[in-house]
């Protein structure tokens, strides 16, 4: 949804075909033995040389067997994957590539695959690389088990520090502390764990769990930190540190109510703890957002402007909606009570959000993601999104279901969630989930709205495509409908979903996966192929049942109108009016039942012309026609009218960004000829703004900045 899909671009289609051929070739080699391999020395030398030159590319893979016991014999290199040369017990060597690892600033490659690391690779895939060499590719984090050097299972010939095998718990703990102090938290966790296995005293075990919990917090393993803190305090009174760490884990797992409760205890028991006071305020704010939708949207905007990546410290609010079955559409979100146009349905924090800073010229964060099974190629940060989700689920298994429950089409996930105490994260499942549920997003909808409004006619109907993207699990349950009743907006990594119409209880909420444009039924449906459905909304049905000759006539009239617009002659206005009236006659159903998609943007441009000609009465008539063509039913807005009659939107139609500006224009035009309607039109402008941008606290600032529209020449 709003991602940069380049599946149909000829230069990328070739890439997809090549990738598919590679996969077919790989499949045909499945189970074969390696032949004609280079010598051990040659492979090591080449890798060390590569390490210096920083080169290498990947292409295809096939299955080797059940598991391999390996030891790395070179320092690691980091490219897309972390790589090193590994040997088995027979001293055969190959390149090992670990994909979807933490970033260098989170965990150095040296810490993941230090020279001498011993590991087991489950179900290894042997990959033929583009340079003709072979490598072992690991896509699933849970396919690797690392053995610390002190582990008895490490083959004798590889054990370096046999003398350490009988060390006491306190000696292991001291080693853990050393690693912790060097910020090598994963190694520290390993040593604390070893110490806990060496029959520590109750006090020792308590300290070890406390120490390990901090290392877990540092490595974002919040589940494990919590579990340590809970078992550390079963017999003993929780210490100040333990309580504080518990609040950190709970906060990061977005368990704000529990977090507040622990913080209150902490405040009571240790009143001088200043950090706890600050944290309590923060957690209370998150709870108010989570339970009541109490957001200070201006604050959110400020944060989105300053933070890079724009990952805001705010929580998710699920409004009056619930997840239910939606017939052939699978599951969907439904209203649980009546809502008004503009009401908040969801304000969701991204589960993960991969940001591409469009102001940076190098575009280094943009990558191509090719899916040979779904025939799709996207450009953006989706590959990074896979890495982020895989990591987050691997580190915090309690969060797995939030993602794995999402729609994944025909993909059959593996049936186990845990092997040998390690969580199983199926990277290919995550990839499929991203492909069907990911949203492309701007830095903020306000920012992209300003572009839309400042663009001229040629840009108006362009689908917005973004390189930043994220997963918002709750919003992912919303199905598509061209004639939708909700819209999504973004403020940094927060998605705001509001109703675009008044909705009765138990109404299914829908929004656009792709903005509906007047380019015909087939072209519209093609965009949904990727998700495997056809839209059957009233507009799509109408397009399908309208005779081809009528559609062609409509297209012809549209082309004529566009020509007159381009000429920009004042005298052509009358001709455009006639064309628009003739186009309206090609529809058999009224716009309040089936919006007239071919007309609204032309009418919009006509309103602009009337505004430039300073004809307020015409502006009012034309702007109301724009709204009517999109399905709005408005009472009391047309002229002439009896003063004092209120203007009421009886039915809301399709919500397009540019309608905000039309309402602002209407407000300005009414000021001149029907002043009692000015405020009413402005109120509708605000509601429309709130829907499209997510909030209306910055409405005055935005429309002030756009200059006084009514004063434009
Ligand atoms: C992002 S998911 C939406 C939630 C999904 N219905 C579920 O059960 O989890 C997208 C999938 O929903 C279904 N879907 C969405 N809109 C639909 C529509 N208008 N008609 C039929 N199926 C639709 C398609 O299977 C699509 O691949």
Image (cartoon, rainbow, N blue to C red):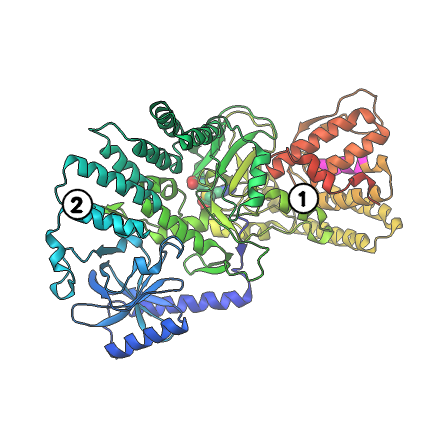
- Callout 2 secondary element: helix
Mark 1 residue crowding within 10 angstroms, few (<14) / some (14–19) / many (20+): some
Considering the image in quadrants, where does the C terminus appear?
A: top right
Residue behind mark 1: 597
* Nearer to us in this view, 418 or 94: 94
Magenta stretch: includes residue 625: yes
**Residue 676 visible (yes or no):** yes
What residue range appears in magenta?
Answer: 620-628
Q: Image quarter for residue 682?
A: top right
Mark nearer the N terminus (1 vs 2): 2
Residue behind mark 2: 170
Q: Is most of the magenta stretch helix, strand or loop?
A: helix
Eyeballing the image, is 566 above or below 346? below
Which residue lies at the image location 45% right of the left edge and 67% below the top edge? 17
Mark 2 residue crowding within 10 angstroms, few (<14) / some (14–19) / many (20+): some
Residue 182: percent from the left, percent from the top? 31, 53
Residue 487: percent from the left, percent from the top? 57, 38
Q: Is residue 599 left or right of residue 221?
A: right
């Amino acid at each position: 949804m709003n991602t940069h899909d380049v599946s149909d671009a000829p230069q990328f289609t070739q890439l997809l075909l090549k990738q598919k051929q590679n996969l077919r070739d790989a499949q045909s080699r499945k189970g074969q033995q390696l032949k004609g391999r280079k010598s051990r020395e040659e492979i090591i030398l080449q890798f060390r040389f590569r390490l210096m030159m920083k080169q290498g590319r990947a292409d295809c893979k096939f299955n080797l067997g059940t598991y391999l016991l390996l030891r790395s014999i070179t320092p690691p290199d980091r490219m897309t994957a972390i790589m090193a040369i590994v040997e088995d017990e027979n001293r055969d060597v190959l390149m090992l590539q670990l994909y979807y690892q933490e970033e260098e600033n989170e965990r150095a490659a040296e810490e993941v695959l230090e020279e001498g690391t011993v590991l087991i690779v489950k179900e290894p895939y042997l990959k033929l690389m583009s340079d003709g060499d072979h490598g072992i590719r690991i896509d699933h984090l849970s396919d690797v088990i690392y053995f610390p050097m002190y582990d008895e299972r490490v083959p004798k010939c590889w054990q370096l520090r046999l003398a350490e095998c009988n060390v006491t718990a306190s000696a292991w703990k001291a080693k853990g502390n050393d690693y912790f102090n060097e910020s090598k938290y994963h190694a520290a966790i390993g040593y604390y764990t070893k110490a806990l296995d060496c029959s520590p005293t109750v006090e020792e075990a308590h300290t070890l769990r406390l120490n390990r919990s901090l290392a877990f917090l540092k490595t974002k393993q919040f589940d494990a930190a919590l579990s340590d803190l809970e078992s550390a305090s079963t017999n003993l009174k929780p210490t100040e540190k333990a309580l504080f760490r518990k609040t950190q884990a709970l906060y990061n797992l977005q368990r704000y109510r529990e977090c507040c409760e622990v913080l209150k205890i902490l405040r009571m028991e240790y009143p001088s703890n200043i950090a706890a006071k600050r944290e309590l305020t923060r957690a209370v704010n998150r709870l108010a957002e989570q339970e009541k939708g109490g957001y200070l949207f201006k604050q959110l905007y400020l944060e989105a402007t300053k933070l890079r990546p724009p990952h805001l410290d705010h929580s998710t609010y699920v409004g009056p909606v619930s997840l239910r079955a939606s017939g052939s559409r699978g599951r969907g979100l439904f209203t649980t009570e009546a809502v008004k146009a503009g009401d908040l349905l969801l304000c969701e924090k991204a589960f993960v959000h991969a940001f591409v800073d469009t102001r940076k010229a190098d575009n280094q964060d943009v990558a191509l993601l090719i899916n040979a099974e779904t025939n799709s190629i996207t450009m953006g940060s989706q590959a990074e999104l896979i890495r982020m989700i895989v990591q987050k689920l691997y580190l915090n298994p309690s969060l797995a279901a939030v993602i794995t429950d999402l729609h994944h089409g025909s993909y059959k996930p593996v049936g186990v969630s845990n092997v040998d105490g390690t969580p199983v994260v199926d990277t290919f499942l995550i990839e499929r989930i991203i492909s069907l549920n990911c949203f492309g997003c701007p830095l903020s909808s306000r920012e992209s709205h300003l572009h839309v409004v400042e663009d001229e006619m040629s840009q108006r109907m362009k689908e917005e495509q973004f390189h930043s993207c994220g997963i918002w699990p709750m919003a992912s349950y919303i199905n598509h409908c061209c004639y939708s009743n909700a819209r999504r907006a973004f403020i940094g990594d927060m998605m705001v979903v509001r109703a675009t119409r008044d909705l009765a209880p138990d109404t299914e909420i829908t929004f656009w996966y792709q903005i509906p444009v007047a380019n015909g039924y087939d072209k519209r449906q093609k965009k949904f192929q990727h998700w495997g459905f056809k839209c059957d909304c009233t507009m799509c049905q109408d397009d399908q049942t309208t005779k081809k000759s009528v559609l062609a006539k409509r297209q012809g009239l549209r082309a004529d109108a566009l020509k007159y617009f381009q000429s920009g002659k004042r005298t052509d206005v009358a001709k455009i009016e006639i064309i628009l009236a003739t186009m309206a006659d090609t529809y058999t159903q009224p716009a309040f039942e089936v919006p007239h998609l071919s007309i609204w943007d032309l009418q919009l441009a006509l309103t602009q012309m009337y505004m430039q000609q300073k004809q307020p009465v015409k502006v009012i008539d034309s702007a109301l026609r724009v709204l009517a063509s999109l399905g709005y039913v408005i009472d009391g807005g047309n002229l002439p009218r009896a003063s004092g009659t209120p203007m009421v939107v009886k039915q809301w139609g399709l919500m397009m960004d540019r309608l905000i500006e039309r309402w602002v224009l209407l407000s300005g035009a009414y000021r001149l000829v029907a002043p009692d309607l000015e405020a009413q039109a402005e109120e509708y402008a605000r509601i429309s703004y709130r829907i499209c941008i997510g909030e209306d606290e910055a409405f005055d600032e935005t429309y002030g900045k756009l200059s006084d529209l009514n004063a434009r020449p």
